Image (cartoon, rainbow, N blue to C red):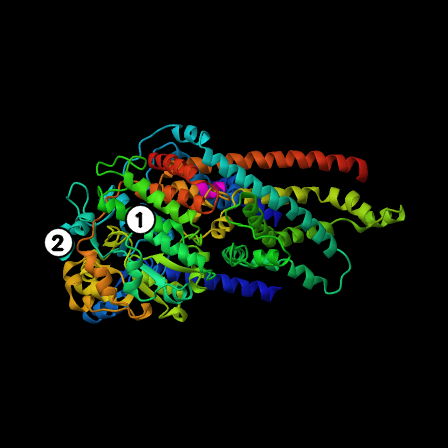
Amino acid sequence: MGLFARRRMAAVAVVAATALLTTAGCGGDEPAADGPVTLTVDVFGQFGYEQLYQEYMASHPGVKIVERGTGGNLDEYSPKLTQWLAAGKGAGDVVAIEEGLLVEYKANPQNFVNLLDHGAADLKGNFLEWKWNGGMTADGKQLIGLGTDVGGMAICYRTDLFAKAGLPTERDAVSKLWPTWQDYVKVGEKFKAANTGASFLDAATNTFNTILLQSAGNAQGYSYYDTSDNLVVDSNPAVRQAYDTTMDIIDSGLSGKYGAWSEEWVSAFKQAKFATIACPAWMTGVIEGNAGPAAKGKWDIAQVPGNGGNWGGSYLAVPKQGKHQAEAIELAKFLTSAKGQIGAFKAKGPLPSSPQALDDPAIASSTNPYFSAAPVGKIFAAGAKSLKPVYMGPKNQAVRTEVENAVRTVELGQRNPAQGWTDAVTNAKKAAAK
Amino acid sequence: MAVQLDARPPVLPGPRTGRHAGRVRLSRFDTRYSPYLYIAPFFLLFGVFGVYPLAYTFWVSLHDWDLLGSDHPFVGARNYTQLMADPDFWHAVVNTLGIFVISTVPQLLAALWLANLLNRQLRARTTWRMAVLIPNVTSTAAVAIVFAVLFGREFGMVNWLLDVVGIGGIDWKSNRVASWVAISAMVDWRWTGYNALIFLAAMQAIPRDLYESASIDGANRSRQFWSITVPLLKPTIIFAVIISTIGGLQLFTEPRLFHSGTNAIRGGPLRESQTVTMYMFENAFAPHYNFGYGSAVAWLLFALIAVVAAINVLILRRLGGGAGKEDVL
């Protein structure tokens, strides 16, 4: 017993010491004076920065870069980041912020360094205009974040499942199958009739979001909130139209009902349980990560039905709580430069928000070996400069959650489309008021 | 010796009396205050990690407190009045109580039964006793993730087994009662063995001669169990019930990790298995960041636990008391 107890004490001591070391290791608490500076970069999903860090560390011998959160879920990352900011401690020196969350942070810009005070104003020409403006507070006095990527749309599909269903597999032919979402539903019905054992698409929520951002972008340029921040979820025709189109998809039984980003969704990728997925540029990295090396060459990319649209895209910001702000700002500028964006695109596929990068031959000619050597540069970059952004209001994230949940309840058969719409509107109003 | 001692006082009167008085004062201080010093560490820690957060949470709950905002206007009891009229909150309360009942009742009964088995003469008794504790030392997160996979709609083993015996699969994550059962299974898997060991320890403190005289009187095993073991375990059962109440009503990790993907904190599309702690988290953090409202949820949860624990104790006291009078005395 005595030995056992002592061993346990030793184990506790080891755990405690490890915890202390880990705490000391992150956050970059060491003095900035001479020794090497450790910069922590907080990300989610796949930003594709590993190669760029190596390059940056080679040219800046005094800087060491540590990335946290790679491959993580945005839903887990955003509350963590908010807690760090609220606590005044814990956030990385450079943090990635998804555009939906940035809206909330813009209301409280005091947590971030104003990049305009650090010579960022000269960089304006390096970004698509709307992307640059997105990082700016409403009064135009503070720049919170520098743009990383934009979410140009496409549809990713499995060629093996398409072949099994007797559909064309070549990407141009596939693109021609669905000029509109109604055509997409028809192709889906054909696919379903072929009984391949797989569903046509992964989850209705992903498709709903794609259709909404596309129709909103093509119409007024806003979705749940109008540009004066009034909640218009029930009066904006773009929302209703996207909802109705999604109901057609659900009615035809095309969805596999794998809750987006859940464990089942990931398993469904691995087991080839669905044939198509709405595919913003950053999704290509996610598919590769989820479907794994075994599915290499079985995926391809076609045009999205309808026209254009932007979903997602992020910014890099420097929290005020950081100890090495000057170094962090330099790093953020490097990672969001045209060169940095090209590097990230080649590594994991996020589409550049810099016109120079989009024009770069390295992008235009790039192909993605995982997706049957699809010319991703051509597919995504072509429409990127004419992307029509969608304005996001103050509680966009909470409202979007409610509407997507309503779509999900209809998809699972818990509600009929009319009830789902009522739920979406009432719950969205309630969430906006919280 | 005595003479010498007697001779001294006149020589050094001043310092002697002073030192004496000092020592008396010190000893009086010692007897009066030392006990407080001895128990102080607990109260200091309790103050820092118990009372202070409790009071601060209450303070926050009286404000409109945006987690990131710089000013937090005082709103009095508004968060509480809103919460009392919030159907999602009461929905979460029902979920929590439902999961609590489905998990705790069978868990404590099973623990009692297990403890009774382990209290008999068995081969390799220590091994068996250690074995029931093994589920308890696994990490909650690991348990929750494994169970979430087992209870998957399409790729889960439970549905596969149901399919084998000809029952259609159940959507464990978006069916209210099914999700309660699945989460209860996780809780029970982890805590039954732990409670069994606590009951076992109490059983071993019951004097053997009670059983001996009972068997002489012709009482069989089950009669002995219900008339001797259970009544004498009453204090331990009350302890286990209170601990399970606190744990059960604060349930978070199991239901949170049971769901994955977008907005898992909701506990299913229609909040099928969202517990009160999850509702608190949803409001205080993503996606609402309304710290004041979240704190109000925390305080109501505190009140709820106090009420449920009190009811438990009352029920048990009545049951146990009756049994004690009839059978033991």
Q: Nearer the viewer, mark 2 or mark 1?
A: 1
**Is residue B277 found inside the magenta-colored segment of the image?**
yes
- The amino acid beneath tag 2 is Lys
Q: Determine crowd level at label 1: few under 14, some 14-19, many 20+ residues with C-alpha closer than 10 A.
A: many
Query: From the viewer's perspective, is residue B229 above or below residue A382?
Result: above
The reply to whether residue A82 is in sight is: yes
Magenta residue span: B275-279
Regarding mark 1 in the picture, which secondary structure is present there?
helix
In this picture, residue B237 sits left or right of residue A312:
right
Q: Decide: is A177 above or below B69.
A: below
* Residue at the left extreme of this rendering: A122
Q: Quadrant of the N terminus of chain A?
A: bottom right
Kind of residue at badge 1:
Ile
Q: Nearer the viewer, residue A57 or A247?
A: A247
Q: Are marks 2 and 1 on the same chain?
A: yes
Q: Is residue B199 magenta?
A: no
The rendered magenta stretch, by its main secondary structure, is classed as: helix
CB contact under 8 Å: marks 2 and 1: no
In this view, the residue in front, A329 or A236, is A236
Chain ID at mark 2: A
Can residue B68 be seen? no
Left or right: A213, with B303 as reference point:
left
Provide the residue designation for mark 2: A124
Circle 1 chain: A
Q: Label 2, label 1: how many angstroms apart (C-alpha)?
A: 30 Å
Comparing B262 with A94, the one in front is: B262
Which comes sooner in the sequence, label 2 or label 1?
A: 2
Residue A338: % across, % down: 17, 62
Q: Which residue is mark 1?
A: A211
